[in-house]
Image: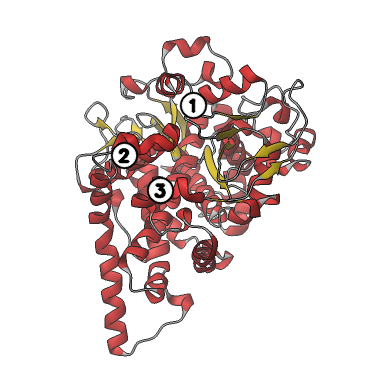
Amino acid sequence: MLRFKKGFKKGYIYEPYLQLFEEYQCTTLNTRFLWTDNIISMDQEHSKYVLSTGFSHFWRGTAQKERLENFLGDGIFNRDEEQWRMHRAMARPFFARDRISDFELFEKHTHHTLAILSNIASSGRPCDVQDLYARFTIDASSEFLFGQNLNTLCGKLPVPGCEDMSAKGTATNDSWGSFVQAFEAVQQIVTLRGRTGNIWPLFELFEDKTAPYVKAINQWIDPLVQNTLSHKAAMQKAGVQSNLQDKTFLQHLADSTEDAGVIRDQLLNILLAARDTTACLLTYVTYFMAVYPDVTRKLRQEVLDNCGQEAPTYENIKRLRYMKAVIDETLRLYPPVPINQRQSRPTSCTLPSPDPTYPSESRQPLYMPKTTTFFYSTLLMQRNKTLWGPDADEFDPERWIDPEKLSKFTANPMMYAPFSAGPRICIGQNYAFNEAMFFLVRLLQRFDTFTLATDAQPKSSLPPSEWKCGTGRKAVEMIRPEAAMTLFISGGLWVRLGRSSSSM
């Protein structure tokens, strides 16, 4: 436990787990603590079984529900069985192709975001794009799902050297900043609960540490729910009816239940996914564009060849092969949800033979005890050199284009699962791809250079100097990746952008 605590505080992301796998020469192990089994895995065969082929033997389980109950409550990410199926069926129509390929909404919020970036770039100042992308994604997704623009892009932006560190980056001192700090702090707490194991309640005997943050979140979200319920009542009184196609997701929820708490929980679950996952993807793509100028030039040329200076269409985006490769490679190295978990049901089962990462590891199937937590790290699996080759830690978009390199993935699709797999695969992944690609097209039409502004980065968030003596990505990392439910960059991602002369 002390080894984990020290490793997570000072080491590279999930380094403590990787060290254990290396030490014991296996891809799945039991970190049994205080008579409780906790299985940790980076094995793609075991993950495939838990998420897909052996799906019926696993569920979210009681341990995760207890940790997340006060935060995510009755939402889709915190429920099993009929409740989960109901939530998923309810959400699916709102992610149909005709809805997610209507780019008018993306254009509106992208235009606002790029106007802000242009103003900052013209002054020569750096920008925390991680914060800005979080605002863009929550404004776009809130209007898409709930019919209401939260206008977070209109709020105060972080100023280098003048902002406090939040749990996931920087935070402004306003109402949006208060929500962000609470939203991110509660994710840190529930992540720490997971690392502590089943004894986490001992550290919260006298108080629920999430309570003050959940209260702050609810104060921000509850008015949205109440306004929707009031609107529903007014429409019913006036005898006005509308079909599903004309309704927002929030209105659809309100039609399904009068319980404001249930609506709020589902709303919060969707906001978590919509804000954090796409913002994470855009942040790390920008990081790579800053580190690899040649990638930026190639991306920009592809955009200009296919779209010129016009807003991209759905057909345009489908032709952007190199951009899709850059996104896939970014998601491979930095999956937004880098670790997740399931729990075996109240009957034991058998995990299949492990993948061949360690030659000395037994090829025998593994016994999985009943009601046991199974943690699986997508991040470690997607950087596994046995699966991806000796250059697995390197950023190489060509591995998604070159037929020989791509054959590794096509022969074994489960080794790449940034959006999970099986029946619980993310229903919003195509929305995320469309949103990210649309935004990147417009970004590259306007800007042609991205430079890391390490002078603006909070000093405490920079990678420790000893990392340079490490191996893999740890040795070359120019930012500090961390995770609290979703991946983020400690202290934000501060960059300076160069305006393209053709867009002026």
Q: Earlier in the sequence, mark 3 or mark 2?
A: 3
Q: Check the image and name the residue furthest to the front.
A: 35
In the picture, measured across the screen, residue 39 lies left or right of residue 127, that is: right
Q: Is residue 79 above or below residue 285?
A: below
Marker disc for residue 66? 3
Image coordinates of residue 248 in percent, x first then y, are 41, 70
Marker disc for residue 85? none
Q: Earlier in the sequence, mark 3 or mark 1?
A: 1
Please say if the residues under marks 3 and 2 sit with CB atoms less than 8 Å apart. Answer: no
Q: Secondary structure at mark 2?
A: helix
User: Considering the image in quadrants, where does the N terminus appear?
Assistant: top left
Image coordinates of residue 465 in percent, x first then y, are 43, 11
Name the residue rendered at 38%, 72% in the picture. 251
Q: Residues within 10 Å of mark 1 (few under 14, many from 20)?
A: many
The residue to which callout 1 is attached is 13
174 or 320: nearer the viewer: 174
The residue to which callout 2 is attached is 185
